[in-house]
Image (cartoon, rainbow, N blue to C red):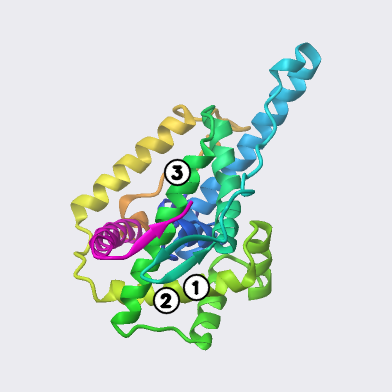
Amino acid sequence: MPLTTRSSARISTSKKLLTSVALVGSLFGLAACGGGGDAGSSAEADGSQGASAGASQPASEGAQAAPEDAQPSMPEPDVENVPDVVATVNGEEITGEEFTAAYQAQFQQMAMQSQMSGQEMNQDEMKKQLAESLVGTELLVQDAAEQGHSANEEDVNAFLEETAKSSGLASVDELMATFEEQGYPEDQVRTDAQKQLMLDKSIEEMDIPDPSDEELKELYDSSIAAQSEAQGGASAPAEGGESAQPETPSFEELKPQLQEQVKSQKENEALTQKMEELREGADVEVKL
């Protein structure tokens, strides 16, 4: 994918929403095709299209020459033995229903990555990692509540409207339909949006340093290098002798998106450290 000014937003973080929380961060990232989530969503969308093409083409050729060479079918999420309560965190339950919705929503993306990399999926390990992520999320939300942070229904509605708008969707209903396709029900989306708002307020109180120009330049250089490698060097000329590849945007053009990505990375690191501190003194039982 060419690194154009329009697609430069793809460099920016896809986890502005529900920062550092694997569960909801990835879910909102799937929906947020613009604003803070533009990067991952577009890249994943393009990757999905490429993977689909890659899957269908070899399978078709294999069918003509050797059927056994066809691509394996997409695996199904294994959620049959998920307990009614996956974990308790300081007396608060993480239900099997909540866990299952989260796992199914993430599974498709993980399965696609597995097919592209050729690595076998370990669903037991994936479920353990998700359970730990949910525990960390609950610890952060409990801490935010203890600090006096909250989010009411009006706040959540405004948040979802902004998410739909930044995603290029016409309405919150359309946003919810996107989540439904990922196996995530509306009530859970609203709960997770409320958590995000509470975590945002906690982040605002953290002493997180602003990105330096050195950090931004390093990210810019690495992003340009990665794009060049992905494209395999210079693209073939288009009709008329002109290059089909748009001009690479300058550092100054991309600086706002780079700042967002580095800022989000620093927030993730601060929240991860906070989670570890909270876990040390917490009463946690994972039953998965």
- The residue where tag 1 is placed is 193
At 25% from the left and 63% from the top, the residue drawn is 274
Q: Residue furthest top?
A: 65
Foreground residue among 65 and 286: 286
Amino acid bearing label 2: Leu
**Distance from the alpha carbon under mark 1 to that under mark 2:** 6 Å
**Distance from the alpha carbon under mark 2 to that under mark 3:** 38 Å
> Horizontal and vertical percent for residue 15?
43, 59
At 26% from the left and 65% from the top, the residue drawn is 278
189 with respect to 255 (left or right): right
The mark that comes first in sequence, 3 or 1, is 1
- Whether 70 is among the magenta residues is no
> Horizontal and vertical percent for residue 19?
39, 63
- Chain part drawn in magenta: 260-288
- The residue where tag 3 is placed is 247
Image height of 186 relative to 154, above or below = above
Amino acid bearing label 3: Glu
- The residue where tag 2 is placed is 197
C-beta proximity under 8 Å, tags 2 and 3:
no
Image height of 113 relative to 11, above or below = above
